[in-house]
Every structure is written in structure tokens, then in C-alpha cells.
Amino acid sequence: MEDPVAPGAGSSSANSNGNGGGKGKQAAPKGREAFRSQRRESEGSVDCPTLEFEYGDADGHAAELSELYSYTENLEFTTNRRCFEEDFKTQVQGKEWLELEEDAQKAYVMGLLDRLEVVSRERRLKVARAVLYLAQGTFGECDSEVDVLHWSRYNCFLLYQMGTFSAFLELLHMEIDNSQACSSALRKPAISIADSTELRVLLSVMYLLVENIRLERETDSCRWRTARETFRTELSFSMHNEEPFALLLFSMVTKFCSGLAPHFPIKKVLLLLWKVVMFTLGGFEHLQVLKVQKRAELGLPPLAEDSIQVVKSMRAASPPSYTLDLGESQLAPPPSKLRGRRGSRRQLLTKQDSLDIYNERDLFKTEEPATEEEEDSAGDGERTLDGELDLLEQDPLVPPPPSQTSLSAERVAFPKGLPWAPKVRQKDIEHFLEMSRNKFIGFTLGQDTDTLVGLPRPIHESVKTLKQHKYISIADVQIKNEEDLEKCPMSLGEEVVPETPCEILYQGMLYSLPQYMIALLKILLAAAPTSKAKTDSINILADVLPEEMPITVLQSMKLGIDVNRHKEIIVKSISALLLLLLKHFKLNHIYQFEYVSQHLVFANCIPLILKFFNQNILSYITAKNSISVLDYPCCTIQDLPELTTESLEAGDNNQFCWRNLFSCINLLRLLNKLTKWKHSRTMMLVVFKSAPILKRALKVKQAMLQLYVLKLLKIQTKYLGRQWRKSNMKTMSAIYQKVRHRMNDDWAYGNDIDARPWDFQAEECTLRANIEAFNSRRQVKGNEEKAEASLAGRNQRNRKWTSSAQPPC
């Protein structure tokens, strides 16, 4: 039996030739309108206002505290309050906590810590809940959210000064080593929030201490400032033969991913790990200060600009609009027929004239449509990504929907001049002189950039201009020092390595760093919105699922929002943690950064991030997976209203979700860090067909996100071919306007000496050999000493508990 579509298809193709051409032209608009309508329904409107987003180390203080708790845990606020009030009444008569003098408060906290050392697990939990209630701000005695946050911060400083963190650290070690809880969780078919009660209470107290003490305010007293620096030192360095606190949390992450402890509340572990790294090493602004200081120490010239301030002053460009070009591309003849026409030259000149006025129009307003070749490549890239990450859900690429904009392009006033000062590497000057000498003299002088004899005057001027913009990075100096130490180890002597918090963290992570990176990426894969549930994937919902599953539609909707919010917070914490680690390690030593980067690349971090962006990013950024009345501290002050379907669907009134936009920018920055100046990794972006995926992210009107998307597109334009560059001239113009220029960088033309595919394998192997030489020379001895100290501390702790009358249960 014949296919019923075949005759219609055949007649349509017949009508498109000869005398039937008119009917074909009439049928095209109808098909185009149907395609537009279908795309509108599938992806929704692309109208996106400029997002007023201020990038920083973290969100607001209240938001960061509220993300610690899932909505399933809200009932435990009342439990914590009851445990505190029962204990407080037995110790203090006729007064409330806020009515006590500071000395009386300290005496009560000391009593609480003493009662933590009981053998009974149930009694320890009640006392720990009472401490948690204090850290949460004694909300039962407060009248507003501001009061709760104020007293939470006050109580956390008080608790830390009385030694609460050290006491809870001991309890955390006990819970991590509790084999009974691990085996019980492994036997259960479904793990719920009840299996991690003790761990959640301990981690919540420690997170509140870190987050409240980390926050700096001008009104802080000298005593609080001193306590903050003492706490930072305690977390950064090995105290009492113990490993740094961040390493303990990293070990919890790997133990969770190995399946030995599926009951660990992984969201709380990751949030605490991120905040500990930020507190001990410093945030993004502190990184900029450290960079300026280090350049001064190495005798390098100061930075031409503050990158953070430059990005903040940039304006977002309009997202792509496909309305006009879609129709033109469908009706336009192929290029092969266009060449033979009489008016082809006139059409090309007209097209060139239209490109010359891009400064007066939005950069993406009339972006060219995706060609058939690009759509095919997008499909191939999707299949390639699924091959690399088979746990992820296949989400086929859909071309962006048409916009309902009018024919008149919206004009934008761009700032005069380019935002970034151009940079030139020493390598660029050497390549330029090598080509010039070969052309005019016939021989080269190696790395000599000063001898210009025999070269014409314009070459002299060019070299002068290049040297004026020459930029020597800290990494260049560090690599040169490593080469000198390898060549002359005896004459230069032993290198003095300062014991900074970053250096100590790297030494502690070195032996298990591959496992740490793989574990973080596994959790990120499980939390990605494009992933689908599989039997062999990690269960990251142990600390959000209730004991009894919902039985009503309303309860199911609330749990669904809670689960989505839970995953978003995990993505946020992992992306921020990885970015902070890479930036600090790069500043500390370039080979530490390269070591972490290589293991991320080996663990398929690049296709994982691309798969994350292979979704409707605009919908992800504007998602409203939050219930404001259930967020801390709001839920502790007022009685919870009766939730309805409308109130759950409404979400909050924010224009976008801060954490999701923050996560997207972090992942783009992470991808930039991994691929910058690495041709083999840039080719991975090309092989995985990342160009259409990244182009769709430009629909989000946020300057910082667009900047890092354009950077990723810039480094691969030379590999995408002339046709892609011709079809995406507005994107090329945006790259020219927003991304830093590198003189002699032929990114727009495809002429690159370093882009030889046969050198890619050698490039990674050489880098790996340099990293191994660096680690073996600097780190082995230090790590042996750290391992011995850690083992001694663990043995000492075990002897302490085994000497008790009864072992802790």
C-alpha cells in the first residue's frame, strides 16, 4: 500500500519547478506560518527584558540561609523550638533567652555543650536541636524577619566563642564513621529524610555558624572581627593534627557517591563545602585583590582594568529574532544558483552595505536563521553528547521561536570605544617576527624580539605597537620558573613554598583529587534538569523526600517544587565551588589549576556542561520553584497560610531566579577556564556541536552571561567554516564589540598556526608531563607529612571514644 503523503509531496516538488512555481510560492507562507505556530507552542515567547542581575559571591543573606532547608523540613522548626524550651526551663526560671545577660547566656551554652557528651543518641539529638534553635535566631521570641536574622547572627558568634563548632565537629566525625546508620540505609528500598536526621542537625548548625560569621558588616565589633579571623584560620589550617575541614566534607562527597553512605544529606554537605572554601580562600573580589598583590610581588605591571567593574558596566544585547530571516531563507535560492544570476554582485554589495550599519542596530535583532547544515550539525551534536553522557536525557535541539518584533529595528546607544584593553602575548610577538623575517630576510632569529635589522619601517611600527600592549600573566612567570627549576635544580636550590590556605588545601586534595572531581560531576549530572531517572544514577533526594509520600494533588505539587528547588541549589553550589577552586588554584600556581582542569576534562565536564545548556535556558532562568511563605525566616514568624494550587503556581514576583542565572554564568565561566588556549579542548566544543547550543543562550538579556557565551563562540569560529561565519555576522559583530581583542589573533578568518590537529594529542601529553613533574617535586613530601598527621589525629579520636564506658551508638 502506498504512503498517502507521497503523492502530495511529489506534486509539491513538481509544482516548485516549471509552470507550477507560482503555486509553490503561495504554499510556502502557509507552511512557514504553521512552523512558526508550532515553535511558539513548543518553546513559548522569546521576549525577554534586560535582567537586572548583580553577580557576586552569593545571594542575599536571607536567601542563602533559606536555601539550607527544604520545605519538607519545615515541621522540624517547631521540634527544635520545643527541645530548646524544655531544656531552657530546667536551667533558667522565669526568663526568656533574650532577657538574659551575656554571661548568663554563655553559662547556659556551656551547659548545653556539656550535655552533648552523653552516651544516649536520643538525648544528644535533643540537645543538638536546642543548639540549632539558638543558631536559627530563637524565632519564638522575635516579631519580624529582621529580628530573627539579627539574633541568629548574634547567637552564632556567641556559640562559636564558647567552642560549639569544635564540639559539633567531633559529633560529625562520629556520624560519618557510624557504620550502623550506613548499613541501615543500604538495606532500605527507599531512603527518606528520616534517615539523615542527626547529620542534618549537625550540618545545619555548622552551616549557620560559617555563613553568619563569614558575613562582614561595618557595625561589627572588634571582638567579632577577631573571632572571624580566628575561625577562618581554624578552618584553613590543620588544627590539633586534624585535616582541614574542607577535606572532611570532600570525603563525605566521595563516600556518598561511592554508594557507601546513601543517607548523607548531600545538599547541606555541598552548601557547607562551598561556603567553607569561600570563607577560607576568599570570594571573587578578594581574588582580584590577591591578583593585584601577586603581580606587584613578581614585579609585573598593574592590571589595565578591573574585570569585575568592566563586566558590570556592559549592557546586554537583544536576543536573536528569526521572524524576517526565516521567511527569506526559506524562499531564497541556494548559493549555487545565486552565483549564476546576473544581479548576484549587486545583491552581495547590498548585503555588505547592510552589514556596515550594525553599530546602529541591535546585535542580534536580525540574526541569520539556522541553516539546514547547522540544524543537522545540532542533531549530530546531540547524539554525540548522549554518547558521552548516556545518563542524560536526549533533548533535541529546536530552533528558537520567531519574535513578534516589528520591522523597525530598536536602536541601542553603545558606549564609545571597546570595553577591554587589547592584550598581546610574548608568543604572538615571536610569531609575527618569525613570519616577517622569513618574508623579508629569509631566516629567523628564534625568540629574539629586539633585533629588527633588515625589516621595513612598517614592521618596526607594528612591533612597537605589539610591545605597547604586551601582557605578561602570573602564569607565564610561574611556568618560566618551573622550567628554570627543572634545568638547574642544584644551582637554584630548593623552592620556598608559602603555606597559604590555598596551598594547604591543594596538598590535602592532591592524592584524591580525581575522585573528588568525578564525585562532584556525578552529582551535577544527577541534578541537571536534562537528566532522567535511571536505576544506576545517584539518588540525591535523600534529604528532601518525606517518610510518607504525598497522597493529594496539592502535596504532590509542593513536593515537586521542593525537588526542583533542591536540584537547583545543588547545581548552584557545585558550579560556584568548582569555579572558586579553579580561580584560586590558578592564582596560587598555574600547574595546580591545570591539574584540576585535566581531571575535569577527563571526567567529561565539557559535554556535561553543554548538555546542561541544551535546554530552554530562558525558561530555566525564569523558573519559579519556590514558595515564599515557606522560606526561612518567613515561615518561623507567621502562621503558615493554607496553601492552594494557585499560590503554589504563582511562586514569587521576581523577574528571574537568582540562583539559576548565577549557576548558568558559573558554568559558562567554568567552560571558558577549561578551554582557554587549549586547542584540543576547543575542538571538543566543535565536535560536540556547541555553537547552536551556545547561540540559543544569547536570548537571555544579561550582559555577563552573553559575554561568556561570546567568548566560547569566539575561540571556535576558526573551526566552524566560512559558511557559518557568513551566516552569523551579527554574532561576529557582537564578539568584536564585547570580547577582548588579541592582536594578531585571526579568530574571524581561520588562519591559526597553533590550530594543527596533529598537535592536539602532544599538547595534552606535554602538559600532563609538566604537571606530574611539578607535583612530584613540590607536593609528595608535604602530602606524606599531612597524611601522617591526619592518621595520628584519627587514631587519637578513636582512642578517646573507645576509652568511654559505653561506645556511642
Image: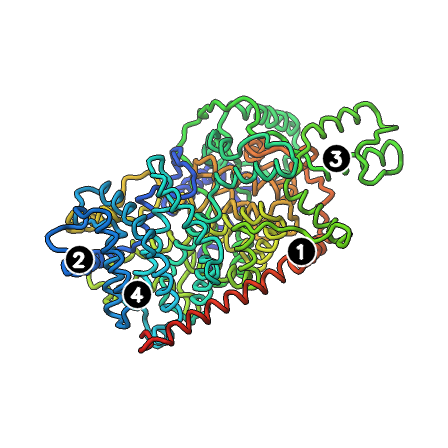
Mark 2–mark 1 contact, CB under 8 Å?
Answer: no
Point 68% across, 43% down: residue: 477
What is the three-letter code of the residue carrying label 2? Phe
Label 4 to label 2: alpha-carbon separation: 21 Å
The first of marks 3 and 4 along the sequence is 4
What is the three-letter code of the residue carrying label 1? Phe
State the SS at label 2.
helix
Of residue 490 and residue 756, the one placed in the foreground of this image is: 490
Label 2 to label 1: alpha-carbon separation: 56 Å
The first of marks 2 and 3 along the sequence is 2
What is the three-letter code of the residue carrying label 3? Ile
- Frontmost of labels 3 and 4 is 4
Label 3 to label 4: alpha-carbon separation: 61 Å
- Residue 99 is situated, as x and y percent measured from the top left of the image, at 16, 46
Tag shown at residue 429: 3
Q: Residues within 10 Å of mark 4 (few under 14, many from 20)?
A: many
